[in-house]
Image: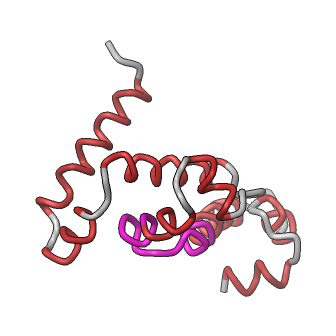
Amino acid sequence: MLPVYLQGKILELIALHLAPILDNGNKKQALSRLKPDTIERVYQAQEILRSRLENPPSLLELAQLVGVSDRTLRRGFHELFGTTVFGYLTEKRMEQAEILLREGNSSVAEVANIVGYSHLSLFARSFG
């Protein structure tokens, strides 16, 4: 039996290949322009961002880590997730911040720091 992580990755790849068939025409055309290897690399970049919310790599560093150009990475994020790399990062940071704030164990300043904002004003602007 495969480890759970590998099973999840297999299901993810299957879903990626089925998505163009199941989605509407515009999205189908957008996804079909990405090679399966590129799609996998964009998802690797997504995982890196999720695991490094506090201190994410720059766009160029992230592209190098997954082995694509920054242009390909930007295009892949837009086509797969409907947002920019920075937009995705901000969205995930805000989701994590909301969870932490709802738990009530940390101050707003602590939560801002945990999700990677060194200035409370930048966090407040992003969160609001």
64 vs 5, left or right, is right
In the displayed structure, does residue 63 sit left or right of residue 112?
left
Q: Does the segment drawn in magenta span residue 79?
A: yes
At 40% from the left and 74% from the top, the residue drawn is 82
Query: Is 104 drawn above or below residue 37 in the view shown?
Result: below
Q: Which of 24 and 59 is in front in this view?
A: 59
Nearest the viewer among 30 and 1 is 30
Q: What stretch is highlighted in magenta?
A: 76-90
Q: In which quarter of the image is the N terminus?
A: top left
Which residue occupies 81% across, 70% down?
117
Which residue is the extreme one toward the top?
Answer: 1
Residue 121: x and y in percent read: 84, 84
Picture coordinates of residue 96 (x, y %)?
Answer: 64, 61
On the image, which quarter does residue 93 sit in?
bottom right
Q: How is the image coloured?
A: secondary structure
Above or below 52: residue 82: below
